[in-house]
Amino acid sequence: MIIVILSLLIASPFIGVFLLNKYKWMGWLLISLPFVPVLFFLIWSGLESQHYFVRTTTLANEQIAGFSLNSSLSAKQLNYLNQFERMMNEDDGYLFESNDFRITMDGDDRVISLLVSDPSIVTSSGLKVGLTVEEAIAIYGEHYYTYREMCMGTAIVYVDRENRYELKIWMSDETVSYFSFSVY
């Protein structure tokens, strides 16, 4: 079936050119037919990448271990990060990593991503590793979508479109196994 549809999409412009002199409207219709799926795909990709298929969730006040997205670090936070391994990031920023907590900063020294798998670290809203998925949904609400990634499993994703924040809660056996909070 797919081969038939692809064959028609490829053949339609050639047939359209042939019909253009006698049936002008039919010729133009057949010539333009292959552009419809391409246009649909481009529009769909744009909407999907901007998370327009899920209602926004306000995440502006969310903090993890005292760190907020798009914020610069205080002297106390920098001192705390001295116990982390520091690596260069591809965005001319830094990646600070310990066993169960990772902080990514951009070239302007602002926090752009936090990843947590330590059960002792809790967000300002109360999310932590080990909670059930139902408890996580009770914290952030019903406006999320599910996401699957090979070798990583399934996540529920909350989006704050106004601030361009994304909270991914990764699950294993209906329990929060880790979560990431980032700028998209």
Image (tube, rainbow, N blue to C red):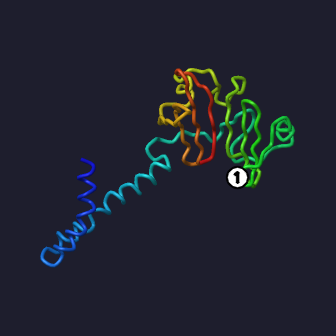
* Secondary-structure class at tag 1: loop
Where is mark 1, residue-wise? 90
Decide: is 49 above or below 159.
below
**Of 81 and 127, the residue lying toward us:** 81
Decide: is 177 above or below 45.
above
Binning the other alpha carbons within 10 Å of mark 1 as few (below 14), some (14 to 19) or many (20 upward) gives few
Decide: is 24 above or below 77.
below
Q: Is residue 70 left or right of residue 42?
A: right
Asked which quadrant contains residue 77, the reply is: top right
| Amino acid bearing label 1 | Glu
Residue in the image at 74% along x and 55% along y: 92
Residue in the image at 72% along x and 37% along y: 102
Q: Is residue 77 left or right of residue 7?
A: right
Where residue 177 appears, as percent x and y from the top left, is 61, 26
Asked which quadrant contains residue 86, the reply is: top right
Where residue 95 appears, as percent x and y from the top left, is 75, 44
Toward the left, the furthest residue is 22
Decide: is 35 above or below 65.
below
Residue in the image at 23% along x and 58% along y: 8
Where residue 144 appears, as percent x and y from the top left, is 49, 35
Toward the bottom, the furthest residue is 21
**Of 132 and 137, the residue lying toward us:** 132
Q: Is residue 69 left or right of residue 8?
A: right
Where residue 129 appears, as percent x and y from the top left, is 64, 24
Q: Is residue 41 left or right of residue 166?
A: left
